[in-house]
Amino acid sequence: WFTKQLEVLAWPANSPDLNVIENLWAIGKRKIRDRKPTTLDQLKQNIATAWEAVSAETCDKLVKSMPRRLQAVIQAKGAATKY
């Protein structure tokens, strides 16, 4: 089948999720939860409002945090970090 050998990286079982979108989702969830929607329509509106409230600065900070996140994972040898 394969004509090339692929090098597979070891992936630690406890590897934390380094995807900054997870942090963005957490920010949105907090904003929605704080508004305490009680109907589906309120929930939909709160989701839209929370998403619109995320600033470009917040996204930029999350992206710029990646080197620190990666270094923390390396130092923790793949174990959980504060991120």
Image (cartoon, grey):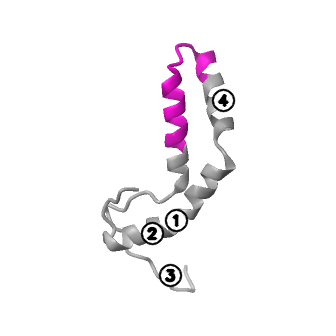
Number of marks in picture: 4
On whether residue 29 falls in the magenta region, the answer is yes
Residue at 52% across / 13% down in the picture?
Answer: 38
Q: Earlier in the sequence, mark 3 or mark 1?
A: 3
Residue type (three-letter) at the residue carrying disc 3: Leu
Mark 4 crowd level (few <14, some 14–19, many ≥20, 10 Å Cα): some
Residue at 56% across / 56% down in the picture?
Answer: 62
Numbered circle sitting on residue 49:
4
Magenta segment, prevailing SS (helix, strand or loop):
helix
Residue 54 image offset from top left, x and y in percent = 64, 42
Identify the element where label 4 is drawn: helix
Marks 1 and 2, how far apart at CA: 6 Å
**Magenta stretch bounds:** 25-43
Residue 34 image offset from top left, x and y in percent = 49, 26
User: Which residue is denoted by mark 3 in the rendering?
Assistant: 6
Q: Earlier in the sequence, mark 4 or mark 2?
A: 4
Numbered circle sitting on residue 39:
none
Quarter location, residue 32: top right
Q: Earlier in the sequence, mark 3 or mark 2?
A: 3
Marks 4 and 2, how far apart at CA: 31 Å
The reply to whether discs 3 and 4 touch (Cβ–Cβ < 8 Å) is: no
User: Which residue is denoted by mark 2 in the rendering?
Assistant: 70
Residue at 58% across / 22% down in the picture?
Answer: 43
Mark 2 crowd level (few <14, some 14–19, many ≥20, 10 Å Cα): some
